[in-house]
Amino acid sequence: MYHFGSFDVYCPWDVMNYLLDLQSDPNVEPGSYWKNTSDNAIIRTFIDYAGIFAGAGYVTRSNREHGEGRSDVAVYDSVNSRAVIFEAKYSRRKEDMEKDCDRAIHQIAERKYAEDLEEDYDSVLCYGISFYKKRCLVREWRKSQLRM
């Protein structure tokens, strides 16, 4: 994790590898996985990388309808009755990351992505993500945080 001003920035590669480690050890601490990534292709890799969840027994869907729109990535764990929604935004400048992350969260709320899943899952987690070059900002959203 990197600290810029008043916010934390997570490297997408670190996030993806940490999620992989969590599958085999729920108590694992985050580590530094960052090695030689160099361009915005990491955004596409993040979206495509979600497919690895399928190998761990999760169902992963990209650009599927939820609520009143289409989320970027949704991961479903029917065994444990939980789902995760990811909405990602590309930032044109580093200074826009916080604003773009907030835009992703507002999109999740406004288009009611989580509401579509609440009847079928005990837990629905939502994350807004913004990317700029090698940087990534991730924020969790809970319905109680934002009133639409």
Image (spheres, rainbow, N blue to C red):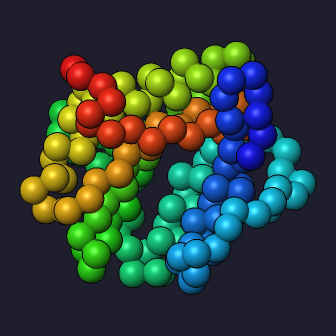
Residue 70 appears left or right of 23: left
Quarter of the image where one finds residue 100: top right
Q: Answer whether residue 108 is visible to the viewer in this image.
A: yes
> Vertical placement of 109 versus 14: above or below?
above
Residue drawn at x 58%, y 66% as measured from the top left: 19
- Tell me the residue at 69%/62% (across/down): 30
With respect to residue 35, does 6 lie above or below? Answer: above
Tell whether 26 sits left or right of 13: left
Residue at x-position 22% and y-position 20%: 148
Which residue in the rendered view is the most extreme toward the left? Answer: 119
Q: Is residue 107 visible?
A: no
Q: How many marks?
A: 0
Name the spot of residue 108 as percent of width and height, x first: 32, 34
Pinpoint residue 141: horizontal percent, then vertical percent: 39, 38
* Residue 65 rendering spot, x and y as whole percentages: 23, 45
Relative to 26, say whether 12 is above or below. Answer: above
